[in-house]
Amino acid sequence: MPGTLPRFPSLPRGVTVPALLNSLPRSINPPSLPRGITMPTLPSFPSMPRGVTIPSLPRGVSLPRAVAMPAVTQAPRRLLQDCCSVLDHQTPGGLCGCCWALRPRYKRLVDNIFPEDPEEGLVKANMEKLTFFALSAPEKLDRIAAYLSERLTRELNRHRYGYVCIAMEAMEQLLLACHCQSINLLVESFLSTLRLLLEADKPHLHILATSSFVKFANIEEDTPSYHRSYDFFVSRFSEMCHSDHEDLDTQNKIRVSGIRGLQGVVRKTVDDELQVNIWEPRHMEQIVPALLVNLQQHSQNDSGSPAEQTEVCFRELLCRAAYGHINNAIKPVLMHLDSRSLWEGRGFAVRCFQIIMYSIQSQHSHLVIQQLLGHLDANSRSPASVRAGIVEVLSEAAVIEATGSVGPTVLEVFNTLLRQLRQSVDYQLTGYYDNTGKHKTSSTEEKKLQDAVITTIGSFANTLPVYQRSEVMLFIMGKIPVPGIYPALGSPNAGFEGSRMIQVMLLKSLLQVSERYESSNLLTALPSSFLEPLLSFTLMEDPEIRLLVLSILTSLIDRRHNTARLATASVALDVSSLELKEDRCSRQDNLFMRKHAQRLYRHVYLACKEESSGCSHYHSLFTLLAVLSVELANEEVVVDLLRLILALQELALTSQECLSVFNRCGIHAVCAAFLNLLSQLGPPPPLHQHIAQVIESRQKDAPHLLPEVIFCDKPRLPDGELKVDEALLFIQSKICEALAGSSYSAHCERFNTPYTPQLSEEDRLSKRKSIGDAISLQVDIDLQFQPETPQKPQTEQITFETLKNAIEDRGIVEEEERRKRMEVVERFQTAPFEEIAAHCGARTSLLQSKLNQVFELIIRPPPSPSGHSAPRSTPLYEMKFPVFKDDAFI
């Protein structure tokens, strides 16, 4: 119609004029229309029906790429690429999907990083543009990551692994660049992509995914995440550690990747409380066995072997374990060693726990020890080889734990080990290690277990401080079965043989503890509660028990480690060449000898009387006496030791004791060897001359009285009864003469009284003294300490000469007072209670008379001027004062 405006076709759906104008080149400026005139509507293009999409091409078939020709313009080439992209990527219909220029910018930037040939690798320039865009618009990170994941999934489904690697590289670079701002927007897509790669059946994709995960694990995040889950990665990486691929090289690579993946999971989750708790049993039961399998099956010679990487990961896992996580990490180790029967081999189990003890924090070491002890109790019905393996691991763990942190229940550790000894004795006697009698065991295996337990007890004790070692020795001593004295540790079915075996093993345990026990104060090292029961075992009939007791005493007294130098019992011993470590006796040492010396001498004397003693017993007796003389020797101790040796010599000569010729020769040899040593430790030279003369006579006429002949495998004994001439004996009078004029002369009076051992009520295994002996001893004491007739006190004027003489004679008086004090101390230590009571009662009247004389002098009135004595007043101590009761006098 005339006058009507032409009608233009409408624009397609979704396209507006501004958008269309913006798509035009900048050089073209369309003219503006007059007011009221609009652009004609463009013809509409038919759209695809809903639900109908362009069919995809078969696998491996794609449209040909546009050929780059100089004559062809850029627009047709871009249009062809857009069509190929649409058909290849199965993009839904629509103009925006078909037209590459109309797609979102982040998709175009992502598409630009992929080259035409995957071998060319990531397009770095375009990757920098994508990174800059991601940093400029962080709200688009989730879309970028989702689209990258979509592209990677397509390439993975079409087996284009080159583009898969490029996509993973792009994701890694985005993670490293954007982690400071909003990494959580990328992580979900990144982790889902890694799951796809790990679920594939291609080893190189597993390695690629693990490498990417490790890079992600090393990123420190600033913002927390509440919804991540790493359960799949723990399971998959643990499965990779068990890979059994046909190719050994590929298998090692997969296992190393799995180990590194587990290491990354630990690093990512262990310090983040919001993440999954990696220390839960369900996770530890997957991680720890996967590591132990590789640690067991491979050697450490190759630097790239799974074993080396496993050890690094295992140590890192353990060093990050807190107090409450140690048990969850150790329990799978114990379960793995049980299921694979690895306790018996010892090597791998010990190596595992060496890694554990060196990796965890030192204050948590006792938790590992407690786990092992509990596992040992749980395997009490297992074969002896398994129990021995656990005990040896315990021993090695105790050696590593040098801080002494065994835990608050130190005695419980030793109680568990002693209980294992008791059970081992029961199994050895019955021949079965269960109550049903189905599983047999042998004495050899049980003895190996017992030796391992004893060694472990010593290892544990060596990690403890000194005061706790004393408690441990007392605890072990209390477990030694002695009928009527200590409770029996063995079972009722074990009988006497079982008790004897337990006695031997516990004394061996004591010996292990005492060998490295170092204490400067013997009063604390050997208290009465420990020394008395220990010495009582020197009177046991079993020679092995007596020998162990002598070794324990020697190791406890030898604080300066002179036993090795004094181990040779010989009359040709030169003390100057031994380089003995000597020191002056301290006050505590003197107190110890005053308190326990007589008890030690008594048991040495009684031990020499045992008929079952052999060469080792007499050699141990010599070593004990030698250590006593070196460690605790002073003038008084030397004199007492000389008295003891003379008494032993008399014991070997008497015919009242039923001693064999070997026993008598052994006692004479001990006396000769010890006197030769003692005479070179300080006494005057005449003593050494006398002893050397006797030894020379024995070498000529009676070599069977010397240690070189007796203390050997085949001792040469005389035929018939032993006869010893006086020239072959050490004479008491000559010893006294040799000590005269020296510091020992103050104690020489004690030589007049021969040494006789005092048997106390505590020696339950020895003979008791007869009533006649006790009465005669009491009479001797009463006669010796009979009070003198009281005399009137004499008045003496104190002058300058009196004071001068008192000062000059003070040394002699002090020596006399000291001697008297020692006699009193010795009498109260060794004499029975009845004798002490009788002696004290005899002196009561003397004390009362002395007190009366003192009181008479105190209350004596002064002389009166008239010469008459004043009337005697009532003494103050005799006055009777009234007593107040209920406000009245009584």
Image: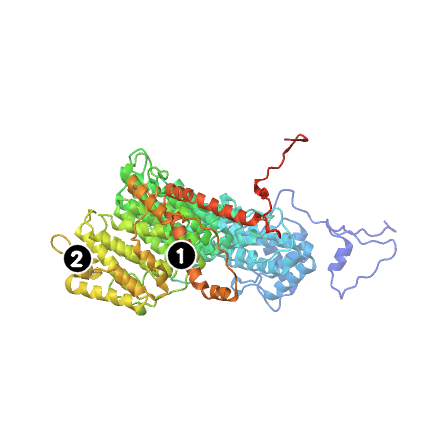
The mark nearer the N terminus, 2 or 1, is 2
Q: How far apart are marks 2 and 1 (CA)?
A: 35 Å
Q: Is mark 2 on a helix, strand or loop?
A: loop
How crowded pointer 2 is (Cα within 10 Å; few <14, some 14-19, many 20+) is rated as some
Tell me if residue 357 comes above or below residue 418 in the rendering.
below
Find disc 2 in the rendering and name its residue: 724
Residue 519 in sight = no
Q: Which residue is drawn at 28% across and 62% down?
A: 735
- Coloring applied to the structure: rainbow
Foreground tag (2 vs 1): 1
The residue type indicated by label 1 comes to Arg
Residue 1 in sight = yes
Q: What element carries label 1?
A: helix
- Who is closer to the viewer here, 448 or 480? 480
Q: Which residue is drawn at 31% across and 59% down?
A: 626
How crowded pointer 1 is (Cα within 10 Å; few <14, some 14-19, many 20+) is rated as some
- Who is closer to the viewer here, 25 or 450? 450
The residue type indicated by label 2 comes to Val
Furthest residue to the left?
719
Q: Where is residue 30 in the image (x, y as percent from the top left)?
A: 80, 61
Find disc 1 in the rendering and name its residue: 819
Q: Is residue 71 left or right of residue 524?
A: right
- Who is closer to the viewer here, 739 or 480? 739
